[in-house]
Amino acid sequence: MDSSHSTNSPITTIHPDIIQSHILTRLDGTALTSAASTTSHLHHLCTENHLWQKITTATWPSLNEPLATSIISTLPNSHRSIFSDSFPSVHYSSASTPPDSSPLSSLKELISAVDLYYEGKSVFSKTLRTETHKGWFLCSPLWIEILEPNEIIETQIKFEQNDVVEWLENNLSLSWIMISPTRQRSVNLSSRLPVTVKRHWLTGELEVLYAVVMGLVQCTIKVTCCGKAGGEMHVREISLSMEDMDGRHLIGRDSLGILQEVMENGERKKVDVEKMKSGL
């Protein structure tokens, strides 16, 4: 048999359009990254931005919003850059003291891209710009609230009556990507799955916490859910804060230094949610 028709023929004999349209479009981001590292030919095909745009916007619908798309277009490798930085969550284990934030005067803003999922399907997405150079941000405890005051997210999710804590722990996931336009880097500050779910002693609302430990600092995201058993679940709060290991809230100035360090030097890896639960 003609060796050119052998099953061992190199992939270069396949038309690039066929590879991109019928093979690479079926891969997720992790598989696409692995394929890109195999040969120079595949690397060229796997780094086409339209493939990464499809993957990132499907993974994080918030990145479809105009604020996010305008920022992504300025990144060195566009959508591939933000996927590389933001998937999965970050792991930063330095035990050093928090970096000095004084050199960060050029860090004028942070962009939050937040997605809330139920059973893997998006139920809420939003991007938010936070100005970081103003006195109120630099000198106050870091607290970023995605929702407007008195805003309620109405969902079609039926509020379970039994085992409500376990129900939310297993089904309500969240992503919070923080983007620095000036540094052209991003990081995912969520553990994806909750590390704890507890009922507020006074209001009866359910507080769902996601957390990532970054050296001597913990980033915590709180989602507050409410609703009547058997009815629909609503969300009235999605907020982010940072604390040291003694539970003291970090001010904005200190947080900026840590965020830059984590964005640039943090390792991207899966978060061990069970380990996080044991530490809370």
Image (spheres, grey):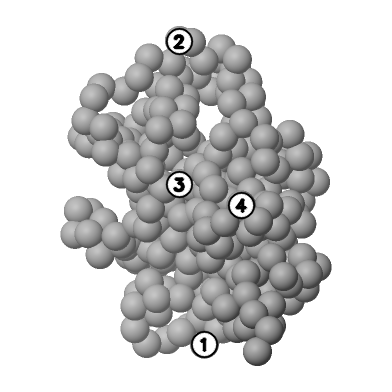
Q: Quadrant of the C terminus?
A: bottom left
Label 3 element class: loop
Q: Is residue 17 above or below residue 164?
A: above
Give the residue type at disc 3: Leu
Tell whether label 4 touches label 3 (CB within 8 Å). no
Q: Can the viewer see residue 112 in this picture?
A: no
Mark 4 or 2, which is nearer the eye? 4
User: What's the CA distance linking mark 4 and mark 1?
Assistant: 55 Å
Tell whether label 3 touches label 2 (CB within 8 Å). no
Q: According to the image, label 2 marks what residue? A: 102
The x, y position of residue 169, in whole percent, is 38, 72
User: What's the CA distance linking mark 1 and mark 3?
Assistant: 32 Å
Q: According to the image, label 4 marks what residue? A: 40
Residue nearest the viewer, comparing 239 with 31: 31
Residue lying furthest front: 1
Q: According to the image, label 3 marks what residue? A: 189
Q: Earlier in the sequence, mark 3 or mark 4?
A: 4
Q: Earlier in the sequence, mark 2 or mark 1?
A: 2
Give the residue type at disc 2: Ser
Residue nearest the viewer, comparing 77 with 167: 77
Mark 3 or 4, which is nearer the eye? 4
The x, y position of residue 114, in whole percent, is 59, 52
Quadrant position of residue 213 = top left
User: What's the CA distance linking mark 2 and mark 3?
Assistant: 23 Å
